Image (cartoon, rainbow, N blue to C red):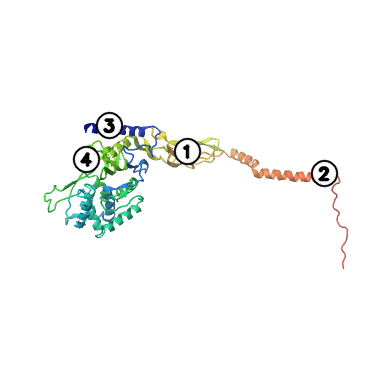
Amino acid sequence: MDLQKSCRRLAAWVLTLALAAALALPGGAVYAMPIQTANAQESVYLINAVTGEVLLDQNSGQQRCVASLTKMMTTLLLLENYQDQLDTISVTAPSYIYDLIWEKTTNASTADIRKGETQTLRNLLYAMMLPSANEAAYIVADYMGGGSIDNFVAMMNEEAARIGCTGTTFADPCGLDTNNVTTARDAYLILRALTSYDIFATVVSTPSYDMGTNDRYTTPGTYVIQNTDKMLNEGSAYYRSYVRGGKTGSLGEWQNFAGWHTQDGISYISVVLNVPYEADPDQARPALYETAQLMDVIFDSFTIAAALDPTQPITEIPVDYATQSDTVMLYPTDNMMTLLPKEGGAALTEQTFNLPKSIAAPVRQGDVVGTVTLTIEGEVIGTTDLIAGSDVARNQVLYTIARVGEFFSSTYFKVVVMLTRIVVAVYAFLFVLAALGVLKPIEKSSKKRTNK
């Protein structure tokens, strides 16, 4: 057993080095990195929360079992409808929901909320997100569905479609039903929607929560629930200071995790689905382990930085009809803040200019002359305007000469000259014929009119 464990640790260490090497290679693809996690069957979607750039997309469109990530949607509907009433509304647990849970499993995660007990919506929110309490999700679903779980599930599916999910179907409010399916990209969309609520950020970043007292927990401080996201616990091997929270899920031989992470002002949202236990050397929290390995590399390898400097010229362009300067420097109007490798940074970008061959004076500082498009490894970062960095006056003599020259070289002038030549040639030809007597003058009629 120890030998197997050591082998797994070695494999994980080699994977981490491989990922680091792939990410750190100069010129390596930044927004669609050709890497995989330890298990090719996993689904992964890792995106920069600020720029929207996708760093890792692995099977993100394939449907996977949602498991307890389902509770993110239950939470989203709760917050959309009752975020300002979390402490003023209390709900009693109906007895029938426990039968629905026990039909699926007798080992469901719980916050120890019993039949007939009353909890505030705030307590139910914490119960769903921290220990992943299935009864809490059902209590919320019963309340919001007007006593019908089916009604609430329909609301879940409608909300999923509304926020853009295309591969998600819910069958229950907690994730015990294996017919709950989603994709890594869809799970990202749900979590992104949740991060707009301050209360959600507070809840999922909480390692433990005091549920208060009731008839069974009469001593204050004894009814405390724990967060399954061990990346928040400083004493845990999975702890990472950049983790802001998320949601775990597991069924059978694999686990899921959707979370978001912030360090040095840079934020990411990550989703890993269908991570097998063997991905974790300790075979305890494979989705958390996988997330930590990926995010460690990402934070070590990338940063948000300016790809352009608006205070520095990026190129120049010739100016016609000017004597004080035959070119003008062009400056970008935007610094193009984007996700860049720490090694190489903006130097790895490629610039494509959309400019005329030259521009005509007068030129005013700030005039838009063209655009520049930035790419990195073929992926477009963005496009920004290029403006003139200084005034350039027109030399009227050069302009007049140029205009005269343009007139004499114009098609109009050439047509006039050609027509004139034709007229002269015809006239000369007729003159010659007349001189040779070939053409005779036309005699006028000598007949006089007579009055009748």
Q: Give the residue number, with chain letter if any, for mark 2.
A: 432
Left or right: residue 430 compared with residue 221: right
228 or 414: nearer the viewer: 228
Q: Quadrant of the N terminus?
A: top left
Q: Give the residue number, with chain letter if any, for mark 1.
A: 352
Spatial CA distance of label 4 from label 3 is: 25 Å
Residue 249 visible, this angle? no
Spatial CA distance of label 3 from label 2 is: 106 Å
Q: Secondary structure at mark 4?
A: loop
Number of other residues with Cα within 10 Å of mark 1, as a class: few under 14, some 14 to 19, many 20 or more: few
Question: Which of the two discs, 1 and 4, labels the residue nearer the N terminus?
Answer: 4
Residue located 35% across and 36% down the image:
302
Q: Secondary structure at mark 1?
A: strand
Q: Give the residue number, with chain letter if any, for mark 3.
A: 10
- How many marks are shown on the rendered structure? 4
Residue furthest to the bottom in view is 452
Determine whether label 1 and label 4 are within 8 Å by CB: no
Q: Secondary structure at mark 2?
A: helix
